[in-house]
Image (cartoon, rainbow, N blue to C red):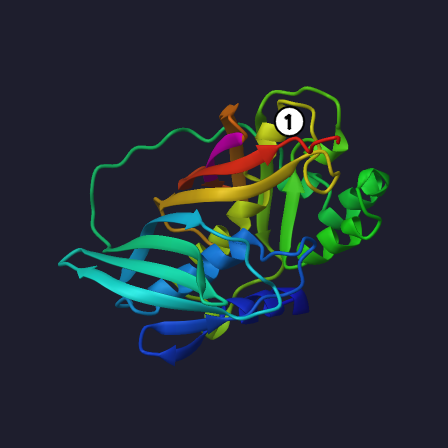
Amino acid sequence: MSQALQSLLDLLDLERIEQDIFRGQSRSAVVPRVFGGQVAAQALVAAGRTVPEDRHAHSLHAYFLRAGDPGAPIVYSVDRIRDGRSFTTRRVVAVQHGQPIFHLSASFQTYEEGMEHQAPMPSAPDPETLPTGAELLPRYADVFADPVIAERLLEARESVDLRYVDAPPYGTVGEIREPRSQVWFRTNGKLDGAIDEPLLHVVLATYVSDMTLLDSILLAHGRGGWAVGDVVGASLDHAMWFHRPFRADEWLLYDQESPSASGGRGLGQARIYTQDGRLAISVIQEGVVRIPRSD
């Protein structure tokens, strides 16, 4: 396991300070706020630690309320909303400086057999044929708004091997493209031993899901995003449904599209498939997407 991946696992390993209250830390961010995928993943960890081990996360719905301060701990308070015969529901509020910054509802279910069908996996190239972040980011270093952004983007993705099928938004600024984007991802190292548990794989996918979901919005308008400085954006809400078991240390295809953008907001939706074609996760997110004022 790489040191970067171990650091990410440490970041997601919350401290229990009361029965249903947990504390998490942050790590340096490129922008002066906590990465939304981190807060969502940590909140899911908090919820999962109050649920019986035989119940697995099947959905989450979340709202980002305020920008998180990366220099301060985050306190996660869990409400045990319901413990039914098949389903368990939890509500989590993340608090910093006495104010809620994030709210999550998550549902867990015992395994059962049922009807089975899925949307087919779209075509995509073999991930091993695509450039890694270390190979891709230096090609576009001259387009970033700040010379240190490329280096910090690379640092942020050392724990996750994320590979774009086509050029990322910051690679084709000014070019109008179809509002679709595909990336392959997996952790940068195997998840073996005591830490290898179903919740961990779901939590890691939740963390990665906030990295690129709004890319397809930018592609439709020839924008490069916050790293280029031609868009001001932030996640507003986030929902995920976990359909089938998967491993976060094996390749997952993140097939993303945007059906709409209006009113300073944009919608991204996606399906995540295992490499052998099983639909593992569905994702929807709305975010603020504004063009900076010139005055």
Residue toward you, 54 or 217:
217
* Residue 107 image position (x, y, % from top left): 28, 53
Quadrant of the image containing the N terminus? bottom right
Query: Which residue is depicted at the point 41% across and 67% down?
Result: 76
Left or right of 203, for residue 123: right
Horizontal and vertical percent position of residue 16: 40, 78
Judge whether residue 248 can be spotted in this image.
no
Q: Is residue 93 above or below residue 50?
A: above
| In this view, 165 is above or below 34 | above
Residue at x-position 32% and y-position 73%:
20
Residue 229: image location, x then y, percent: 74, 38
* Magenta-tinted stretch: 265-272
Name the one closer to the observer, 102 or 60: 102
Look at the numbered disc 1 and give the secondary structure of its residue: helix
Res. 158 image quadrant = bottom right
- At horizontal 32% and vertical 54% (from top left) the residue drawn is 106
**Going by the image, does 294 lie left or right of 255?**
right
Q: Which residue is mark 1?
A: 219
Estimate the x, y position of residue 61 in percent, counting from the top left: 36, 47
In front here: 87 or 111? 87
